[in-house]
Image (cartoon, rainbow, N blue to C red):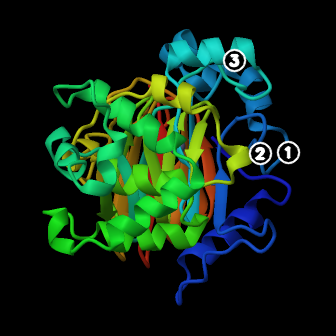
Amino acid sequence: MVQNAGKSWNRRVQALLRGIFSPPPAPRYNERTNSPLYKMWMGTYPSNPSYLLSTGEQLGDYIKKNPQFVGKSVLDRFGPEIPFLPKILSFSKALPLQIHPDLKLAERLHKEDPKKYGDNNHKPEIAVALSKFELFAGWKPLKDIQALFKLKPLEQFVPNSRTTFDDETLRKVCMSLLSAPPTEVSTTIKELQSLPESQFGSEPYIPGLLDRLSKQYTDTDNGNLVAALLMNYLTLGPGDSVFVPADGIHAYLEGDIVECMARSDNVINTGFCPVAQRDSVELFGQALTFVPHDAQGALLPRRKSDKGVQGRTDVYAPPISEFSVLVTTLGAGETETHKAILGPSLLIVTKGCGEMKVPGDRTVEVKEGFVFFVGQGVALDFGTEKGLAVYRAYAE
Ligand SMILES: [Zn+2]
C-alpha cells in the first residue's frame, strides 16, 4: 500500500478539502483559476496524475512497474492501470451541459481528432453528494415533455411531421433548441416567463429556474431551455447519488460531490459555456442516449456492502465493470474492517481523522484530505476517536 500524495499533493488536497468542508462553508470560488469550480483528480490520468508521497514517483509509473498490485482480473481486462478516475468537485455555477461518448463513438472521435478526444474509452460516471447537490440528469418522461411543448412559445420547436411524440421527436426537439439563434432563445425564455405558473402543470418551478440559469450564462444560452424543459431537475442530499450512462445527458448545477468515472476525459459540450467552447449540435444530437427517462431512473441506490465486516460500509455499484465506490462512515469510537479487495483502489478521507491498520502490523494516520492507493489483496482496519468518513473507489 502506498500513500498517494506527493510533492505538494498532500497539502493541496487538504487545502482543497478544508475549502469544501470547513464550517462556515467557504465560498465555492477558486481564486487561483478564477473560476467557480474547485476540482481534484485522483489516479493515473496523464494530464492530472497522482504522485507517491514517499518518492515523488507518478502513481501510473509505479503501477506499471508493479502490475501485481492491480490483480489478475483487472490486469487481464485493463492492463497495469487504474481503470477509473475519482474526483472531488465543488462548484457554485452550472458546469457545461454535456455527454460523454460511448465506446464506439469515442474510438471514432479519437481516431479523427486525437488532440480534442484524447481517449478511445467511454466515460460512464457516478456523482455522490457531499452537500446539497442540484443537477440535471437524463430526460423527463415523454408525456411531460409533450405536454410542455403544447405551450405556445414552444410549439415552433416540435417538428410538424411527427404524429407521435417519441424519442426521435425528442432528439429533434433537443437539437432545434440547441441550434436556435441567441435572440430566439431569449425571446422564448421571456415568453415562457410571462405565462402563469399554472400552465406548467406539475413543474411550476420552470420560469424561476430559467431566470436562475439565465443569470449564469446569459439568457441566450441554449442550455437554459434544454435543461429546464427536457431534463430531470434533481436536488440531492449528502449520500445520495446519480449514475450517468455513456451518452447520458447531464449538467451539474451546484454542490460538493465525489465523482467517479471510467478512465477517460472525452466530453461533448453544448451549453452552459461560452459559444466558442461548444461542440457540434449535430454530433451531440446523434450521440444522445434516451435513458433514463425519469428522475428515479437517474438515481443510483446506496446498498450495504459485504466488504465491510462490521456493517458500517455501503456501496454505490453502477452497472458497469470499471468501478464501484464504497463509503464507510464511523462515529466516535467506532471501527470497521474492509475485507481484501482483489483489484486496485483509491481511498479518500472526506471527514474526520483516525487510523488505518495495514499489513505488516503498521498503522497509518488517516485524516480529512488524505488520499491512498491500495493494492489488491489487502484487508484494512479503520478506527477513530472523533469520527471518520472514507470513500473508496475500486475495481476487481
Ligand atoms: Zn460529465
How far across and how far down the image is residue 354, in percent? 51, 68
The residue shown at (47%, 22%) is 286
Q: Looking at the image, is mark 3 or mark 2 earlier in the sequence?
A: 2
- Kindly indicate the quadrant of the structure image that contains residue 57: top right
| Disc 3 to disc 2, C-alpha distance | 30 Å
Kindly check if marks 2 and 1 are in contact, taking CB atoms under 8 A apart as contact.
Answer: yes
Name the mark nearer the viewer: 3 or 1.
Answer: 3
Foreground pick, 367 / 208 = 208
Tag 3 residue: 110
* Furthest residue in direction bottom, as rendered: 24
- Residue drawn at the location 47% of the way across and 51% of the way down: 251
- Kind of residue at disc 2: Leu
Give the class, few, some or many, for how many residues have Cα within 10 Å of label 3's Cα (few <14, many ≥20): some
Nearer-the-camera pick, 107 or 309: 107
- Of mark 3 and mark 1, the one earlier in the sequence is 1
Instruction: For marks 3 and 2, give the one nearer the viewer.
Output: 3
Q: Which mark is residue 52?
A: 2
351 displayed left or right of 2: left
Quadrant of the rendering where the C terminus is positioned:
top left
